Image (spheres, rainbow, N blue to C red):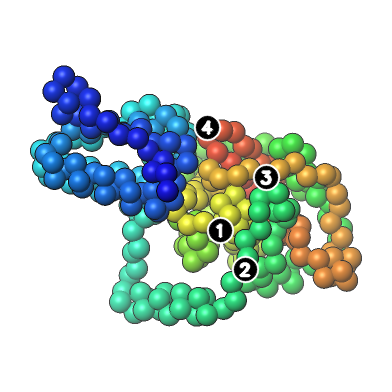
Amino acid sequence: MEKEFSFALIGDDEEIMFIRLKSGFRTSTHQDLLYSCVQENLDRGIKNWIIDLEEVPFPTITVMALFIAITVQIRNLGGELTLVSLQQSAKNNFSTFSPLTFLTIEPSVESVVEVIEKAKEKQKSPQVVEKPQEEIAEHPIVDTFDHSNFIDDETSTIIIDDELKFESEKERGSTKKVKNEKEKPLVNELIQVDSQSLELYKICDFIVEHARTAGIKEKQVGKIKISVYEACLNVIEHAYHSKPGNIIEVAVEYNHAYFKIIIRDFGLAFRKLQNKTYDVEQAVENRQSGGFGLHIINRSMDEVTYESDALNGNCLILVKFLPA
């Protein structure tokens, strides 16, 4: 198997180990090979290291944690590891990396046991075969929350353009402008989690806590919670193809006038979809699940926009305007 990295001794006395990671460096096997290479050369007395990341625009959480582990070992021996040629997108990943994202932290032994037992039950359930990228279209059949509150007699239309902006037929107050009002200080908070389904509940708890702090009514809090769950599940299964070790960043910004949620990932962007109307009754009759997640989000929030670029990743912005 190709190592997906090259290495050579450089410098006048050949005392500096230079490693260049290739674009395919991402799997745990690649990381194990790099770690073994470092161990062998540390045993030989090589203390100064350079790793070139020019071909790795989006280092994963596990890759960044590996660099930290290697750095600790090298510094314990009186040496140093330096990363060079980082693209802006890689710098963004490093700036958003947090030990709270990588480490598992629970409040008590009992909660740890509960998490492990749930993981065992999940392993016993049938596994879903991952589809290739070109077959992925819309939200998969995964229902955890009760969606019945979102089906009523009103008709909602989802309009999806190049930026995946959604609007409803009913008036949603989208002409309102978000302002930094002086009556109440603006609150900004952020949480980062790993791209696995067990982490979704941390995001939901985070959203519920701040939505209640913002004074949103409990029924609306529940709808916002489900919307964020659906959006983040979509990130895990579509943007990251259900692969752990990637970042999901969720931020809230709010005052007395509005409550904004920003969901950011660095995976695959949504591809362009054709404009269409989601008919709830027809979907139920045809046992269709695709598109219902977008329908829920559209019905729950006043403004929904989607932005994507190579440097800043994919960003879904949800806004709920608060009553005066």
The residue tagged 3 is 270
Query: Of marks 1 and 4, which one's residue comes earlier in the chain?
Result: 1
Which type of secondary structure does the marked residue at label 3 adopt? loop
Please name the residue that numbered disc 4 is placed on: 311
Q: Which residue is mark 1?
A: 242
Query: Dot 3 surroundings within 10 Å: few (below 14), some, or many (20 or more)?
Result: many
Q: Specify which label sits upstream in the sequence, 3 or 1.
A: 1
Query: SS at mark 2?
Result: loop
| Amino acid carrying mark 3 in the image | Phe
Mark 1 or 4, which is nearer the eye?
A: 1
Residue 313 left/right relative to 17: right
Amino acid at circle 4? Leu
Residue at the far top: name it.
Answer: 12
Q: Residue 106's quadrant in the figure?
A: bottom left
Q: Is the Cβ of the residue at disc 1 closer than 8 Å to that at disc 2?
A: yes
- Density class for disc 1 (Cα within 10 Å; few <14, some 14-19, many ≥20) is some
Quadrant in the picture for residue 269? top right
Q: Earlier in the sequence, mark 2 or mark 3?
A: 2
Looking at this view, is 279 or 205 the one in front?
279
Residue 10 drawn above or below residue 156 = above
Q: Earlier in the sequence, mark 3 or mark 4?
A: 3
Is label 1 in a helix, a strand or a loop?
Answer: loop
Circle 3 or circle 1, nearest the eye = 1
Q: Nearer the viewer, residue 10 or 93?
A: 10
Relative image position of residue 1 (x, y in whole percent): 42, 48
Looking at the rendered structure, the kind of residue marked 1 is Ser
The amino acid type of the residue labelled 2 equals Val
- Residue 314 in view of the camera: yes
Can you identify the residue that label 2 sits on?
128
Could one spot residue 191 in this view of the protein?
no
Mark 2 and mark 4 lie on one chain; the one further toward the N terminus is 2
User: What is the distance, in whole Å, between disc 1 and disc 4 at their CAs?
Assistant: 22 Å
